[in-house]
Image: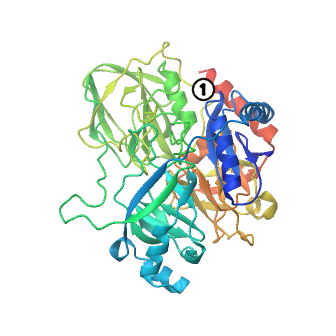
């Protein structure tokens, strides 16, 4: 095993560079051994490596590496659990498997033979990643190997059974995807109420069983339950208008990345934490995140609030605790600077938790949904100290961003073009990834096996246009990553607007750690 830095808050444990059952067993054993270690936030297993996210306020690279080596040494002889054997019913072909005929043509087989081979094999789950609870399945018969689509679909239906190269997989949620779709399953592979949430887990054995579509009117292949409404106890905040996109957020849900569930959380953690500190809350208390344009809210009882982040054309003073009277209406409009604004209330918003977090994962619906007209939110009792004085030396938004980055795991494959180009934030950006547009970077030749990816990683797909992985990013991927945005600049990612200019500046890991310490001191001084 070798260890190397991935970002200023993560490192890779690398066990080799092959895709095999023996390597899978090594990665699975290490993943089990490292769960529950204090200071470790998330584990992202891949085919031959594990990306380890650690809390940089508690650990640095050296102490994290020593802790991991010690833990692995203690558990290296642990026996693996008995594998579970799970059957997945599949409706093959037709509208459920639009690429079945293409797979048959590519392999020189009949569609019936493709189905026969696919359903006769036993698969095992290498790991769960890419998107939420997506299982990477080994054991695809070699005769069925088929290249991915040249251009990914923008929408793959939930439950789609797919082939990507020499791998098989199932899409637990509707999402973009470039694998070949040969069928669909009615089985629900992801249940946020279950413990653990995914049906399929690392090490499971899987067989596909041919089944028939349900009769018309039976509710479809898979019922997507609507997100639960916000809490209706102790009503306090009434949503008159939610604005463009307003969600409840905290700092995210950690400890689930090995199931393909990213942390999510506030897009600008600096403004979010500051808002909570200003009203006397712990920094992880649920607050509202408004994007580009804010809403209109009525407080049904007295409250103390703080508004931080971008200026959404509100009369409320920014970066200061403000008293609100019962019946008072607070209105927000379009942004004047930055992209996201935070509204914290003393006591925090009392909303249900999903997997230990109040954060709404917009792309999957985990944790709820964006606010709607008529919603009501209760105020909790999370306050732990008196409200603070107005903040000084607050961040300045607007005019784009000069993002500081550390070298990524595949930096050696790229030259300096990443740092000599002025990019623009694309309008296609979202909480999953910030797409940059500029002169395309030369894409390195050859592929790479999928590995874990960190928040802020800059990955370069074949078109050469970089993507900065954001708070709802996939947990693993196979694109090279020349750089990673530093933790101290995550707040700038959350404030990028479409068409904002973006420049990248390379710094050392030591420099990144120093900037983060400065930021923590500023927050604690609130």
* Element type at mark 1: loop
| 95 in relation to 260, above or below | below
| 365 in relation to 323, above or below | below
Q: Residue at x 56, y 48 (%)?
A: 202
Task: From the viewer's perspective, tell me whether residue 304 is left or right of residue 298.
Answer: right
Task: From the viewer's perspective, tell me whether residue 294 is left or right of residue 265.
Answer: left
The reply to whether residue 20 is visible in this rendering is: yes
Q: Nearer the viewer, residue 450 or 53?
A: 450
State the image quarter where residue 461 is shown. bottom right
The reply to whether residue 178 is visible in this rendering is: no
State the image quarter where residue 286 is shown. top left
Picture coordinates of residue 500, whole percent (x, y):
57, 56
Q: Nearer the viewer, residue 284 or 210?
A: 210
Q: Nearer the viewer, residue 227 or 334?
A: 227
- For disc 1, the marked residue is 392
Q: Residue at x 45, y 53 (%)?
A: 86
| 385 in relation to 511, above or below | above
């Amino acid at each position: 095993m070798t260890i190397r830095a991935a970002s200023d808050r993560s490192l890779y444990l690398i066990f080799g560079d092959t895709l095999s059952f023996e390597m899978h067993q090594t990665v699975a054993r290490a993943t089990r051994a490292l769960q529950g270690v204090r200071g470790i936030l998330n584990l992202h297993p891949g085919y031959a490596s594990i990306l380890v996210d650690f809390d940089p306020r508690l650990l640095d690279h050296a102490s994290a590496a020593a802790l991991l080596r010690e833990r692995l040494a203690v558990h290296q002889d642990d026996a693996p659990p008995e594998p579970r054997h799970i059957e997945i019913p599949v409706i093959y072909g037709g509208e459920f498997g639009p690429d079945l005929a293409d797979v048959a043509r590519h392999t020189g087989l009949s569609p019936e033979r493709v189905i026969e081979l696919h359903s006769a094999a036993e698969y095992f789950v290498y790991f769960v990643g890419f998107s939420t609870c997506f299982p990477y399945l080994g054991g695809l018969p070699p005769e069925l190997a088929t290249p991915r689509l040249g251009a990914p679909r923008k929408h793959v239906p939930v439950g789609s059974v797919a082939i990507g190269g020499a791998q098989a997989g199932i899409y637990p949620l509707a999402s973009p995807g470039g694998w070949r779709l040969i069928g669909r399953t009615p089985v629900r592979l992801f249940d946020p109420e279950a413990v653990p949430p995914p049906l399929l887990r690392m090490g499971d054995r899987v067989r596909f069983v041919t089944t028939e579509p349900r009769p018309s009117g039976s509710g479809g292949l898979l019922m997507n339950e609507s997100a639960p409404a916000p809490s209706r106890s102790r009503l306090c905040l009434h949503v008159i208008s939610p604005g463009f996109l307003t969600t409840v957020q905290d700092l995210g849900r950690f400890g689930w990345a090995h199931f393909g569930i990213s942390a999510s959380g506030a897009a600008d953690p600096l403004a979010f934490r500051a808002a909570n500190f200003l009203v006397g809350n712990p920094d992880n208390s649920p607050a509202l995140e408004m994007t580009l344009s804010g809403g209109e809210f009525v407080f049904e009882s007295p409250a103390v609030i703080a508004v931080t982040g971008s200026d959404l054309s509100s009369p409320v003073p920014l970066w200061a605790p403000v008293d609100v009277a019962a019946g008072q209406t607070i209105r927000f409009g379009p942004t004047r600077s930055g992209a996201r604004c935070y509204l914290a209330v003393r006591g925090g918003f009392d909303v249900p938790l999903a997997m230990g977090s109040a954060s709404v994962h917009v792309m999957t619906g985990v944790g709820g949904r964006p606010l709607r007209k008529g919603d009501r939110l209760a105020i909790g009792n999370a306050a732990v100290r008196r409200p603070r004085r107005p903040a000084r030396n607050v961040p300045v938004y607007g005019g784009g961003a000069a993002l500081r980055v550390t070298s990524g795991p595949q930096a050696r494959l790229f030259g300096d073009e990443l740092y000599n180009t002025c990019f623009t934030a694309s309008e296609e950006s979202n909480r999953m990834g910030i797409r940059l547009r500029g002169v395309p970077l030369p894409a390195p030749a050859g592929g790479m096996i999928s590995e874990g990816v960190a928040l802020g990683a800059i990955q370069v797909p074949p078109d050469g246009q970089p993507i900065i992985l954001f708070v709802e990013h996939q947990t693993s991927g196979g694109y090279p990553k020349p750089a990673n945005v530093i933790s101290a600049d995550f707040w700038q990612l959350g404030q990028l607007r479409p068409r904002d200019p973006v420049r990248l500046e390379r710094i050392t890991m030591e420099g990144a750690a120093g900037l983060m310490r400065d930021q923590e001191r500023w927050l604690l001084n609130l």
